[in-house]
Image: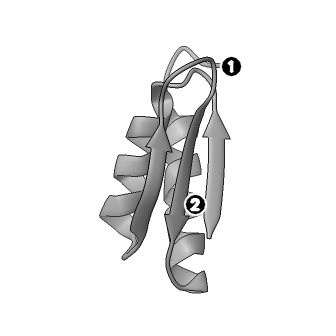
Amino acid sequence: MLVLECAPAAYINYACNEAEKRANIKIIHVSSVGRFGRMWLSGTESEIVTAKNAAIQALESLEGKE
């Protein structure tokens, strides 16, 4: 299981989308309300690592965020 949090909250939708594109995972819950966005994913360990890397890479590639 992976729980990932980011700010601003809306960015979690983009991260979750990228994770789902790259890995065979199940999205348990996505919350993009409030200050922080959170997503809960489940899958095999290797798929979760792939999803985590894809989500983090997506967030880091966004322009205008330090």
How busy is the neighbourhood of tag 1: few (under 14 within 10 Å), some, or many (20 plus)? few
Task: Residue at 50% x, 23% y: name it.
Answer: 33
Return the x and y of residue 50 as percentages of the image width and height: 52, 71
Q: Nearer the viewer, residue 65 or 35?
A: 35
How busy is the neighbourhood of tag 2: few (under 14 within 10 Å), some, or many (20 plus)? some
Tell me the residue that label 2 is attached to. Answer: 53
Return the x and y of residue 37 as percentages of the image width and height: 56, 32
Q: Which quarter shows the N terminus?
A: bottom right
Q: In the picture shown, does residue 60 fall above or below 25? A: above
As drawn, which residue projects farthest toward the top? Answer: 64
- The alpha-carbon separation of the residues under discs 2 and 1 comes to 19 Å
SS label for mark 1: loop
Quadrant of residue 34 within the rendered picture: top right
Task: Residue at 51% x, 51% y: name it.
Answer: 55
Give the amino acid at mark 2.
Asn
Q: Nearer the viewer, residue 21 or 1?
A: 1
Q: Which quarter shows the C terminus?
A: top right
Q: Which disc number belongs to residue 5?
A: none
Q: In the picture shown, does residue 55 fall above or below 51? A: above
Task: Residue at 60% x, 72% y: name it.
Answer: 49
Give the amino acid at mark 1.
Glu
Marks counted in the figure total: 2
SS label for mark 2: helix
The mark nearer the N terminus, 2 or 1, is 2
Left or right: where does residue 11 sit relative to residue 3?
Answer: left
Return the x and y of residue 25 as percentages of the image width and height: 41, 72
Task: Residue at 54% x, 14% y: name it.
Answer: 64
Tell me the residue that label 1 is attached to. Answer: 66
Which color mode does the image show?
Answer: one colour
